[in-house]
Image (cartoon, rainbow, N blue to C red):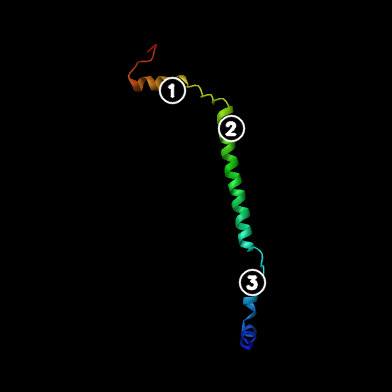
Amino acid sequence: MADDFEFADKVPPSFDRVASNQGFNPGLIVLLVVGGLLLTFLIGNFVLYTYAQKTLPPRKKKPVSKKKMKKERLKQGVSAPGE
């Protein structure tokens, strides 16, 4: 029984701290906060995008100019009216 007390005296003090509560690693806390913010941002963007797709009317296309219409018709081989 006397040997047990001698062994306890020889244990380095660093091993005693492992048994006690050290708290969270600061790097882990930063990682969790940044990861949580990034995840919240991405999920929020996705929710807003899907909401906008459902509720907003489709965008109006720009009117095609007469010059461009002439070029397209000539490419297709159809002569433009008045020529």
Q: Quadrant of residue 32?
A: bottom right
Bin the neighbour count of mark 2 within 10 Å (Cα to Cα): few under 14, some 14-19, many 20 and up.
Answer: few
Q: Quadrant of residue 8?
A: bottom right
Q: Which of the image's four quarters has the C terminus?
A: top left
- Residue 68 picture location, percent across and down: 43, 23
Which mark identifies residue 58? none
The type of residue carrying mark 1 is: Lys
The type of residue carrying mark 2 is: Tyr
Residue at which label 2 appears: 51
In the image, 70 versus 3, the foreground residue is 3
- Residue 56 picture location, percent across and down: 58, 27
Q: Earlier in the sequence, mark 3 or mark 2?
A: 3
Q: Is residue 2 left or right of residue 80?
A: right
- Residue 71 picture location, percent across and down: 39, 22
Judged from the image, the secondary structure of the residue bearing numbered disc 1 is: helix
Residue at which label 3 appears: 19
Q: Residue at x 61, y 60 (%)?
A: 28
Q: Which of the image's four quarters has the N terminus?
A: bottom right
Residue at which label 1 appears: 68
Residue furthest to the front in view is 1
The answer for how far apart the CA atoms under marks 2 and 1 are is 35 Å
Q: Residue at x 67, y 70 (%)?
A: 20
Q: Are marks 3 and 2 in contact (CB under 8 Å)?
A: no
Judged from the image, the secondary structure of the residue bearing numbered disc 3 is: helix
